[in-house]
Image (cartoon, helix red, strand yellow):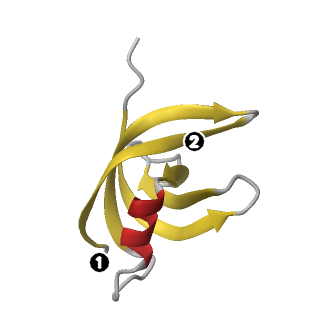
Amino acid sequence: MTNVVVLIGVIQKAYYDKQKDSYFVDLKLEKTIKNEAGTIEFETYKVKLWKGCYHDISSLSSFKPDLILGVKGRLEKDGDEVYVVAEKISFLGKNK
């Protein structure tokens, strides 16, 4: 069984979690199916980053929570919480 996840989304926030001693970003992604009202909804995924990746994101002089980020990683579970552990990230541009 393969554990591979690929996400492309907009960074909502990047932060350090002191309790877990880990770096995270919240990625907002569009759902592929419209709801009953005909509008597109969004989901937010928690992505765990390695320290170097987090510093790459947070040190961008133009960092605003509107960067489009591509993430390749794997799913990991910590108690009841499930998140994506990033193995590779790519900056894809800015959200319009």
Q: Say which residue label 1 marks.
A: 96
Instruction: Choose mark 1 or mark 2, whichever is in front.
Output: 2
- Horizontal side of residue 82 vs 50, given as left or right: right
Asked if 1 appears above or below 65 in the picture, the reply is above
Q: Quadrant of the N terminus?
A: top left
Which residue is at a point 40% across and 80% down the rendered structure image? 59
Residue 7 appearing in the image: yes
Q: Residues within 10 Å of mark 2 (few under 14, many from 20)?
A: some
Q: In the rendering, at what x and y percent does residue 67 appear?
A: 35, 72
Closer to us: 93 or 19: 19
Closer to us: 50 or 70: 50
Between the residue at mark 1 and the residue at mark 2, the CA separation in whole angstroms equals 27 Å
Label 1 residue SS: loop
Label 2 residue SS: strand
Q: Would you identify the image quadrant in which residue 69 lies? A: bottom left
Tell how many labels.
2
Q: Quadrant of the C terminus?
A: bottom left
Q: In the rendering, at what x and y percent does residue 76 appear?
A: 56, 33
Q: Would you identify the image quadrant in which residue 10 lies? A: bottom left
Find the residue positioned furthest to the top.
1
Q: Say which residue label 2 marks.
A: 83
Which residue is at a point 51% across and 69% down the rendered structure image? 12
Task: Give the residue type at disc 2.
Answer: Tyr
Task: Give the residue type at disc 1.
Answer: Lys
